[in-house]
Image (cartoon, rainbow, N blue to C red):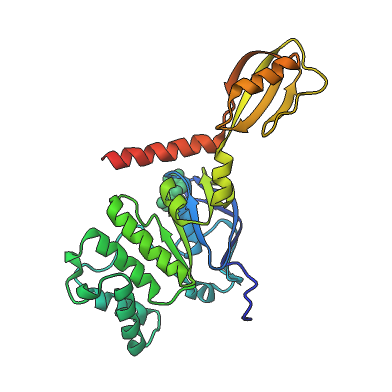
Amino acid sequence: MSASEPHPALEIADLRKTYANGVEALKGVSLSVADGDFFALLGPNGAGKSTLIGIVSSLVNASSGGVRVHGVDLLRSRSDAMRMIGLVPQEINFNLFEKPFDILVNYAGFYGVPRAEAVVRAREELARAQLSGKAEVMSRTLSGGMKRRLMIARALMTRPRLLILDEPTAGVDIEIRRDMWRQLREINAGGTTVILTTHYLEEAESLCRNLAIIDHGRIIEHGPMRALLAKLDVEGFLLDVEGGLPATLPTLENVSLAAVDAHTLDLEMPRARDLNSVFAALDASGIRVRSMRPKSNRLEELFVRLTTRDGAEAQR
Ligand SMILES: Nc1ncnc2c1ncn2[C@@H]1O[C@H](COP(=O)(O)OP(=O)(O)O)[C@@H](O)[C@H]1O
Ligand SMILES: [Mg+2]
């Protein structure tokens, strides 16, 4: 491949998955993750995150659609694509009766890394995971946070260009979570593309530059974290208007007004803006508002669900 990498780290096109029991877990998902990005796939439980990660890491067969890893087609050149991916599954799945050093070296050996090289890498990864002092203890004796860091260290033994983590911090306490965030930031700063799935809004916000939000098997948002937060800062109302609407609607700074029908106005404005000046302007234009209701916003509803779940877990 040329030095100037023209391909995204991951490209997914119209991916669909229907499980044997008829559940449509993915209903045509498309997304793209740039080389070097730190990307979150955010969504509530059951949204389809693990199914998507499972397909990308070849654990699950897609029903249809395409996946490319740095331009390499996953279906046509599976082993070439897989070589570029490191996967950290949600459940701790190393042998608890092995030592961290052996877990790393054996894993690399399984993927064809010569032993001498694997030993060098294992030392490096143990240091990066702050586990050098635990290289030779029984893994069973590691703390929960150490076990998580070892899972990440293991995935890095093959030097993947793309590191994928499925809910790496689900159910772990905040201290461990912060530790893992530090480790992941460092990995990304070293040039590795990182994709993680999470149902913690706070995690996506703290770590990721870009994200996609998935709900019920569909992508409902895809773009920079910052743009998403700006979008959440806007609120919308539907106004029921007495009599008819004038031919021209008033113009107000930062406020968007649109007629839905002869008696209904759609109003969008920044959350911090006061409503009095808006109503004064409407009044001056002869518009009498009889009632108003907040516009239902799918994204906002989803975020409320995500944050309340977050809050419920924090209280446990
Ligand atoms: N092996 C399976 N067989 C049947 N249905 C499944 C299977 N795995 C997941 N599902 C269903 O697919 C949907 C998406 O699940 P999943 O991808 O695990 O979501 P998430 O990781 O976002 O929680 C859910 O409705 C789930 O019950
Ligand atoms: Mg999952």
Please name the residue shown 45% across and 35% down the image.
304
Q: x and y percent of residue 203 in the render? A: 41, 51
> Relative to the observer, which residue lies in front, 58 or 234?
234
Question: Could you tell me if residue 27 is visible in this image?
Answer: no
> Relative to the observer, which residue lies in front, 273 or 243?
273
Please name the residue shown 32% across and 37% down the image.
312
Horizontal relation, residue 112 to residue 48: left or right = left
Which quarter of the figure has residue 267? top right
Horizontal relation, residue 247 to residue 89: left or right = right
Outermost residue toward the bottom? 116
Q: x and y percent of residue 112 in the render? A: 40, 83
Please name the residue shown 64% across and 77% down the image.
4
Image quarter (top left, top right, bottom left or bottom right) of the N terminus: bottom right
Q: x and y percent of residue 248 in the render? A: 81, 23
> Relative to the observer, which residue lies in front, 45 or 255?
255
Residue 139 lies, with reference to residue 218, above or below; the image says below
Please name the residue shown 49% across and 45% down the image.
23
Residue 235 lies, with reference to residue 67, above or below; the image says above
